[in-house]
Amino acid sequence: MYGVLLTGASKKTHDIGGKAAGLNFLLQHGFPALPTGVITIDAFLHFLHEASVEPLIERLVAAADTETKKLLLTEIRSRISVQEISEWLFTALANLITDIPADRYCLRSSATVEDSSETSFAGVFESHINIPANDLVFRLRDCYASVFSEHALEYAQRSGISIKDIRMAAVIQPVAKPYASGVSFTCEPDTGCSNNVVIQSALGFGEAIVSGELAPDTFVVNKHTESIIKKSITTKQFKYRQGYSEKGGIIRDENDSLTARMPSLTDDNVRKLYHLVRNLELKYAIPADIEWVLTEDGYFIIVQIRPLVQTLSNENFVRYTLPNDLTDAPIIKGQPITDRIVVGKVRHALTKDIVASSEDVIVAKHIDVDWIGNLRNAKAVITEGGGYTSHIAIILREIGIPALFGAEGAFDTLEDGATVTVACNSRPGEAWLGALDYSETTYDLKNVYQPKTKVHLVSSSLAGIDKLFQLPLNGIGLVRLEFLISNAIGIHPMALADYVRGGDLPANVEEAIRNKSEGFSSAEEFYISTLTESICAFASRCPDKVVNVRFADLLTDDYLSLIGGNLYETQCEANPMLGWRGTTRLIDEDYRAAFILDCKAFQRAIDECGFTNINLLLPFCRMPEDVSMAIKLIRDYGPSQAKIGMMVEVPSNIALASEFENLVDLFLVGPMDMTQLTYGADRKAKKLSHYNNQTLATKEMVKIFLQRIPGCGKEVFIGGWPLFQYLSEYRQVQSNNILHLVELPDRMLELFENLRILEASISADEKALDQLLPPIASSW
């Protein structure tokens, strides 16, 4: 048969192609999809035979040099484009049109190699939107000819596919008139995190998104809480709408300023789409890339589903890490794909004709799938337009080329020939001038020790965090709110608080706040919403495991680096390490308004977004009275039920341990501050730096602390292997408290090996230990 109407009955991909097979799956399981007809693979093979191109294809497969291949591709496409349409093909199309009556149609490629779990061929073959019935047969020829384009051949060769094995079917559907369109990924395509659904959307037809022309709106919904945890609304300068001329097609319309800034989906739309996509994923049983349309009358229709290739390996991975002492700010940010850091030289590209070398970081205004062949050797790609749901982003991810999309101003900012470091292992991805000395660490997951000790990650960056959760981690032991404020907000919190209260601020500070809060209902909403999203991003990585988030503990000199910081900070505080910091600052009348904003962000993340796995930590607690006041403010303005803990890092915490014990739910021993205060050595003082690595006295302080809270049954998180290595000594005094370990990402491989040795040693001496404390399992 040359034409079939899809009904959901069993069909084989080798008969109807990958895209049609996905649509048939939708119909089979009752999901909203358009009536669909298919011009089959047999029709394609018959057509090629009539065009007498088989011998040319054989010569193409055998050709060794590029020029010969180009000539043969041109000849094949030429023969296809002039081949007369036989009666059998007219009849097949006419029958489908009779079964699917419509004013205008879409004709879409559906190759056997397309939309598979190994290759997507996203955007490589030709599809046509909004064409009249009498034009379908000619567009079908174009679709057939696109199998033999240079970029199709390049992609096929990189994927280990012979072009003679590509078989093309074509999908025929009526046009769905869209209010908005977009793409949904059932896991995060840039990280592989399977806990969240990513939705990207724009007004009108989705061509602007998949072509990479437009930076779409982005919504992230967590599967555990089913709450919207991220909402990023872009300025959408244009949209594609249906053309009504004789030839049809789509027309680009410029949006007015109000329309350009409005969300393409309401929150209610997002929730409805999430449930549709989530149900589809559960039925599909693997991560999926789903294209959809929101019709003008308010209904969602799925127009495509294909497997989304996972980015995480189950055996090993490489973690890329930037230098710890990096102080320079990145000069470009964008949406990253392909989790890597690379160093290369900037090469500007205005057209697809540029041929990238192995050292080139190609910087362009916009790229699409036609560029694939010439980008195959690029070290990285940076483009001002597009996003990670575009066809070219999908293909670059598949072939392993790191890239930044939506990097505004990159073309003018990055000078041709400049050396740059491109980091695609964080969100957003970033680029720095010069060659940074980054590191690579390979983890072999099969050989990682599974400890009895509960290990928790310390990280205030999402860089590589999803890969790390392939290790035997029990959650995130510490996220520092000050880093989230610095990175996501960049404005002194009191400047925002005073702006909200109508305070008199310098013009440059007010302008910065207005610019940052554009698109939000108020500056306060900008702060709370942005901070909430940052907190939820961490909580969503492990929604069934603990995430300890510490309130901000910036020092006065750190606050000075924020916009408006000079208005609120002492310019030359004698010793910021021992100055106006910690819980003392949070509850102070001169800072309390900012602390209340943080409390509101936590309230939204926990009570509204539903992340009950979040625990709150108070920093640098000098007195029980300070903790008591902070807890009252948290309960007044923040979450009502969340656990509240405190950092143990001041000697008064040891001396008054029993009083603090009555106030909080958990403790985290902060090794750096505890060490500097135990040895009386400012950890920022270069002459005293060797004291920073001392542990013996600090270890004794931890033992005293545990002795003073012998029966409270609290969870006590101990910061870092240098302190935790004394576990056997802590166990002799810790009673029924539960000891956990928190550690930095770059120490993980060494950490698990150390735990293997430590736990074996404790187990060997278990009988002797049992005479001194309850059974060993009580700590693990």
Image: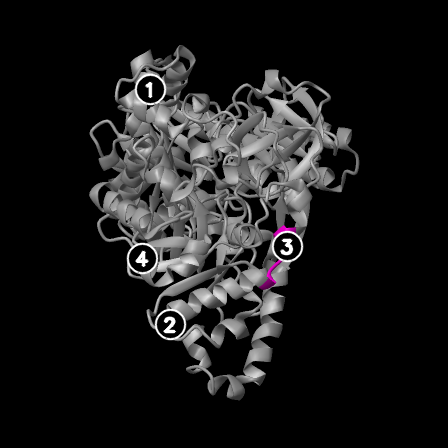
- Say which residue appears at 67% left-offset and 41% top-offset: 686
Q: Mark 2 or 1, which is nearer the eye?
A: 2
Q: Using the image, tell me which numbered label, if any, was put on residue 664.
A: 4
Mark 4 vs mark 1: which is more N-terminal? 1
Binning the other alpha carbons within 10 Å of mark 4 as few (below 14), some (14 to 19) or many (20 upward) gives: some
What amino acid is at disc 1? Arg
What amino acid is at disc 3? Asn
What amino acid is at disc 4? Val
Residue 439 visible in the snapshot: yes
* Distance of label 3 from label 4 (alpha carbons): 29 Å
Membership of 686 in magenta stretch: no
- In depth, the one of 542 and 476 nearer the eye is 476
Q: What element carries label 1?
A: helix
Q: Main secondary structure of the magenta part?
A: helix
* Residue at the disc numbered 1: 261
Binning the other alpha carbons within 10 Å of mark 2 as few (below 14), some (14 to 19) or many (20 upward) gives: some
* Residue at the disc numbered 3: 693
What amino acid is at disc 2? Pro
Membership of 695 in magenta stretch: yes
- Vertical comparison of 539 with 472: above or below: above
Q: In the image, which residues are magenta?
A: 691-696
Q: Where is residue 554 in the image (x, y as percent from the top left)?
A: 46, 37
Q: Using the image, tell me which numbered label, if any, was put on residue 47.
A: none
- Say which residue appears at 60% left-offset and 15% top-offset: 412
